[in-house]
Amino acid sequence: MPKPTSRACSAYTLEAVALLGKLIRQARIEKQITAHDLAERAGVSRGLLQRIEKGDLKCEIGAAFELAAILGITLFDPTTELTAHHQRVTDRLTLLPRYARPKTEEVKDDF
């Protein structure tokens, strides 16, 4: 089955991606870091950085989060909020039937 050429996204998603891109661009300019230097530091191409700053939906979320982290943009509070949220999600997943959860096989590496 061929991949769809475009995917429908909600207005909230479009606004969130655009906002993150603008935050990254604003922080980069305020810190007087060139696009080339930031891209090199994050290990991405300058073109990818520019696409993230423009709010392109096809960019990797990990690259956008890495750029935000380098620039000091706080997306989550890693000390409390994220850990508590992770635990709630894990608790919910344990309530799902086995076939809905991803399989985790124990690796037998004792030769």
Image: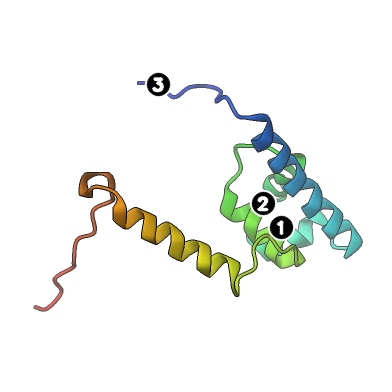
Image-based side of 32 in relation to 108, left or right: right
Which-is-in-front pick, marks 3 and 1? Answer: 3
Q: Are marks 1 and 2 in contact (CB under 8 Å)?
A: yes
Height in image: 50 above or below 3?
below
Element under disc 3: loop
Image-based side of 43 in relation to 4, left or right: right
Disc 3 and disc 1: Cα gap in Å?
32 Å
**Residue 53 sits in which quadrant?**
top right
Judging by the rendered image, the residue that carries numbered circle 3 is 2
Residue 68, given in percent of the width and then of the height, sits at 71, 60
Answer yes or no: is residue 62 visible: yes
Judging by the rendered image, the residue that carries numbered circle 1 is 39
Q: Residue at x 62, y 30 (%)?
A: 10
Element under disc 2: loop
Q: Amino acid at mark 3?
A: Pro
Residue 55, given in percent of the width and then of the height, sits at 72, 39
**Residue 31 sits in which quadrant?**
bottom right
Height in image: 99 above or below 44?
above
Mark 1 is surrounded, within 10 Å at the Cα level, by few (under 14), some (14 to 19) or many (20 or more) other residues, namely: some
Height in image: 99 above or below 74?
above
Judging by the rendered image, the residue that carries numbered circle 2 is 45
Element under disc 1: helix
Q: Residue at x 83, y 59 (%)?
A: 28
Q: Amino acid at mark 1?
A: Ala
